[in-house]
Image: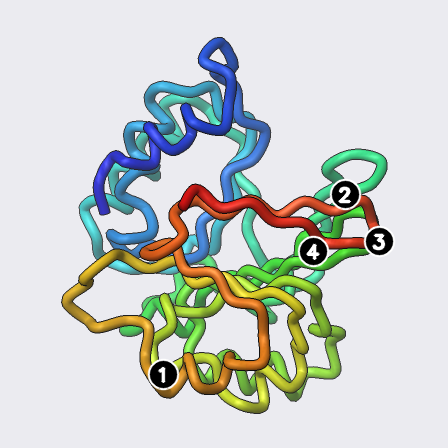
Amino acid sequence: PDNSLLSELSSVMPFYDREIDLVVFSHPQKDHIFGLIELLKRYKVDNIMFSSIDYQNSFYDEIKKIIEEKKINKIEAKAGEHINLGETAFLNVLYPFKDVANLSVQNPNDFSMAVVLNFLGKKFLFAGDAELKEELELANSGLDIDVDVLKINHHGSKTSSSEIFLEKTTPEIAVISVGKNNPYHHPSDIVLERLKEIKLFRTDINGRVKITTDGSELNFKTQY
């Protein structure tokens, strides 16, 4: 929940490249959107995709204001949305199952957008802070959620990464995005035990994680 997003971007993008094709944010909690405020101000963003649930948050309000001021194309996220990213890559939205625009919610985690990035046939699943409720809905939906790489939900919290969800997703590689010495004590030992047979990276230990593929093998490189 700070502006480190900008320095991280400068580490993976050329300094002269100030345009971003698509920004996706899973849900409007501070630790998932704060850095987007300065990003939207400093970069030319062509498209932004999110579920515009009704959730009172000053940072969320600021982002929506900037979107309108800069006339950024907004894509309302709901299951079935398909974003073509080129000849060999596309993004599919799996969740939420219905349009939740302006729906008043108490726990935005339960409405985290879940997307699958498919590149050369290898699949990467990102589901924000999805907890057990959403995981069960996805697991029982009949959707194909068998993936190669899984960004672990909710920073490795014990309220996520249920056994049924991991059984359905069967990732070869898992990545936990988590702050070092965070006050929530993420990731949970329970979750780490469930992930013990999976190749695991953690941003608090490994820093940036880069995963590439030629469509056959997955390759990875970490900052530390």
Along the polypeptide, which appears first: circle 3 or circle 4? Answer: 4
Q: Are marks 4 and 1 in contact (CB under 8 Å)?
A: no
Of circles 2 and 3, the one toward us is 3
Q: Amino acid at mark 2?
A: Ala
Q: Residue at x 59, y 28 (%)?
A: 21
Number of other residues with Cα within 10 Å of mark 4, as a class: few under 14, some 14 to 19, many 20 or more:
some
Q: Amino acid at mark 3?
A: Ser
Q: What residue is disc 2 on?
A: 89
For residue 216, the mark is 3
Q: Amino acid at mark 1?
A: Thr
Mark 2 → mark 4, Cα distance in angstroms: 10 Å
Q: Are marks 3 and 4 in contact (CB under 8 Å)?
A: no
Q: Nearer the viewer, residue 55 or 17?
A: 17
Along the polypeptide, which appears first: circle 2 or circle 3? Answer: 2
Mark 3 → mark 1, Cα distance in angstroms: 33 Å
For residue 92, the mark is 4
Along the polypeptide, which appears first: circle 3 or circle 1? Answer: 1
User: In this rendering, would 39 be left or right of 24?
Assistant: left
Q: 139 above or below 70?
A: below
Number of other residues with Cα within 10 Å of mark 3, as a class: few under 14, some 14 to 19, many 20 or more:
few
Q: Position of residue 149 (x, y in %)?
A: 63, 62
| Secondary structure state at the residue bearing disc 4 | strand
User: In this rendering, would 224 be left or right of 142?
Assistant: left
Mark 4 → mark 1, Cα distance in angstroms: 25 Å
Question: How has the structure been colored for display?
Answer: rainbow
Number of other residues with Cα within 10 Å of mark 1, as a class: few under 14, some 14 to 19, many 20 or more:
some
